[in-house]
Amino acid sequence: MNAVQLALVAVLLPVAVALFLLVAAPVRRAGWPAAALSLAGAIGSLIASVWLLWRQTVLPEQALLEEVRWLPEAGSSAATIGVLVDGVSASMLVVVALVATCVQVFSVGYMAHEPKRDFGRYFTWHSLFLFSMQGLVLAPNLLQLFVCWELVGLCSYLLIGFYWQKGSAGKAAVKAFWVTKLADTGLLLGLIVQYAATGSFGWGPETVSTLQAAGAALPAVGLLYFLAVMGKSAQFPLHVWLPDAMEGPTPVSALLHAATMVAAGVYLIVRAYPIFAASEAVMTAFGVVGGFTAVFAACVAVVQTDIKKVLAYSTCSQLGYMVAALGTGSFMAGYLHLTTHAFFKALLFLAAGSAIHAVHSNELKDMGGLARRMPVTGAAFVIGCLALAGVPLLSGFYSKDMVLESLLHAAQEHPVFWFPLVTCTVSAGITAYYMGKAAVLAFFGRASSHAEHAHESGPSMALPLIVLALPAVGAGWMTGVMANLWGVPDVHFAVVHFTPIGIVATTLALGGLAVAWIKHAQGGLGGLDAAFAPLGALARSGIVDRAWDTAWRRGVLVASAGLAWFDRYVVDGLMNFTGVGFLEAGTVVRRMQTGRASDYLWAISLGILLLAVYSQARMWVG
Amino acid sequence: MTLPLTLSVAAILFALGVFGALTRRNAIGVLMSIELMANAVNINLVAFAHYTNGVAGQTFALFAMALTVVEVAVALAIVVLLYRTRRDIQIDLASEMQR
Amino acid sequence: MIGTIALSALGALMIACGIAVVRARDLVHAVFWLAAMLIATAGLFVVLEAPFLAGIQIVLYTGGVITLMLFGVMLTHRDLDAAIPNPVAHELRAGITAAALAGALLLGIWSTDWGAAKPAATVSVAQIGAHLLGPQLLAFELLSVLLLIAMIGAIALARRTDP
């Protein structure tokens, strides 16, 4: 099979499953067959993706583009739909397919106690999501990307609200939907502006130069797209939906809200990088927003007590790293961090899910000492934790190092990048601290009453942890290969190498881990609590949520009141005026119908008279 | 001279019929006025038949007469029915048509 | 010339009868004025060389219609009928309408150039019969159906419904 066929298999196999399950309700409701089908689709997609990646690696072909015309116009077409196979999309395909497959296998164990109908529904949405995400990854233009972007948003909504019987899950789903929808208007408007200015939905050099020639269009388009990225990739202040999204099942959080869907925003930047890179304003915005999100979310993560919330804020923070790195122009750093983060964050979430499954609680205080009872889970979480903290030789170390290095380079040219450089470096230490704290509280120390009877999860949950732990450890060693694959020249890579900034960050990370160990395992450093207390109060007060709530509510209410007024007095007024007008006219006209035959006769006579006059007049005129 | 003269007579008779139909309040009076108009029409038909020297006009007049008779028969039946239900055949009182 | 004089005389008579028909206070009188007008019309038909129609006119109208009308008047006659006068405005409205109509028609008639008439010839009964049962056969048959319908309809309308 050639590359395009493989890509088509990777993207179309899941959608075939999803459509079949949507239509074949009995199969879906039977539960297990639906899971088997969905898994088959995911594994097929994974095989095709790996095959494709292998081909791209050993035979580094030019990007392959296969498109069919869509939205036909006279002579040409307004848009195309198809697949774009190159190193970037091939590697992302594998990341998505691998994490999705692991999560689906994990879900078989995790969701086993759900009713059959819900079980089937769950896997149907998973198949739909896999299709949407693969379609997004392979999109050859921004319009197709937008369509898939909305589709993954829909899947996110459906899966967050999976436990819809729980009111909070429904609310969280709606919140996620609306916040990302608000952001997505940016993408839509950007598409409109771009198409109006260039007549293309692509990101090729011609399109970019046309945009550049159009003056303000380039930064406008870039910033509009960035708004969508902020929504999807949970950048401050549009991050508010992501912590709430943890209401969904934990495997969903691992797949959608840690590894792939939230990374779609970053992937959009990676994909359409020429458009963003051409505008300095947009790149600066990346740096500032990404840098602030990195440190802000990391600080909030420290005071969280729910293990999933810790991980959710950590995801925000890491996405901030990626965005900031892309802002420096270092495509490699941002995309590498996306890839490694997908592996170790999915691993962390699945391990957390395994722990939650064992103790039936999300709260860190209900866990403790789980490492002895659940060795595989404990090991997986610790590996993920160390990778995320940036301990040397693990995957997170390489990508974080590269991010910080790119920020350092950028800061030397543009002083504004000192801000993300400092925040990201500090965040490295904070990240290590909160992850260490979560690992210590959940897996070491004394077991709480909930955790006493916990035992290791079954193979369907343990296996994905083992599989994901491999790239979480070793993905960084493939940096050179990936650089070739993505066509990034002159990346000098060595397994062991320390840059000055890397040494600082690593020291901070190890320090953070040590502090976490001393404080939470040994009970030392009591004063630290006081230092974080105001932050905790701030986080608990949910000030950002409140601000959004107020702004959104006020805005919506005021706008609705205006629209309601318009509707009531202008639209309805027009309607009522028409109705009342006809009614009144009817009353007037009604008087003509006296019901007396002589009056009708008179009217007939008048008619005859008029006819006679008319014929006379015609004779004279003609 | 024959044709316009005849037509004028018919026109005046027709106008008289209209006037009668509008002013008569008795249903049979109205009916008679309508007869007047129908007769005016007949005169027209015959006048034109004479003018064009054709047989069709006279045939048409015959048809018209037959129709008039039909109309009178039915109308009188209605009048009788009206009288029987209301003991009155004043048509300007008969405003049931409004409802 | 004689034709014109006869026409004028007959026309004047008919108009006079017509006025009497629409203005007579007593309906029975009106019916008789109508009969007179119809007979005058028959005379007009004779002048217009349509003797067969003249005959039919007398037989059908004076024999049938007038008798029917008389029966109608007598059956439904009540003394107070004529007692209620019309409002003047109503009469005026009707008069103006009728006068305007007559004016318009007369204007049309006298402003038209009728040209020379063809040499008149009496149409024979045989010709009418041939025409009726020839080109107009369908209309003739339909008319007979119509007469039947009218007969049944009139009976159905006027019949007493109570047993």
Image (cartoon, rainbow, N blue to C red):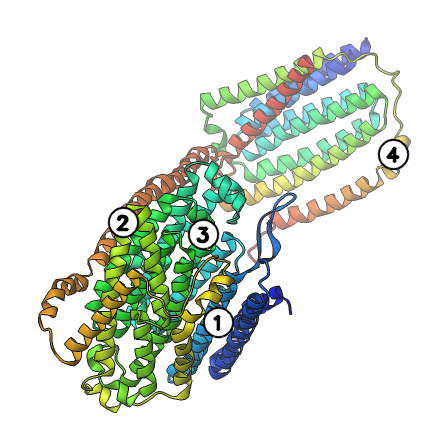
For the residues beneath circles 1 and 3, the answer to whether they share a chain is yes
Label 2 to label 1: alpha-carbon separation: 42 Å
Mark 4 closeness class: few <14, some 14–19, many ≥20 residues within 10 Å: some
CA–CA distance between discs 1 and 3? 23 Å
Closer to the chain start, of discs 3 and 2, is 3
- Of C23 and C149, nearer the camera is C149
Residue positioned 9% across, 73% down in the render: A526
Same chain shared by disc 3 and disc 2: yes
- To the question of a shared chain for discs 2 and 1, the answer is yes
A112 left or right, relative to A603: left
Q: Which residue is mark 3?
A: A273
Label drawn at residue A557: 2
Secondary structure of the residue carrying tag 2 is: helix
Instruction: Name the chain letter of the residue that bears numbered label 4.
Output: C
Amino acid marked by disc 2: Leu
Q: Position of residue C41 (x, y in %)?
A: 73, 23
Left or right: residue C50 versus residue A35 is right
- Residue that carries the numbered disc 1 in the rendered image: A97
Residue at mark 4: C131
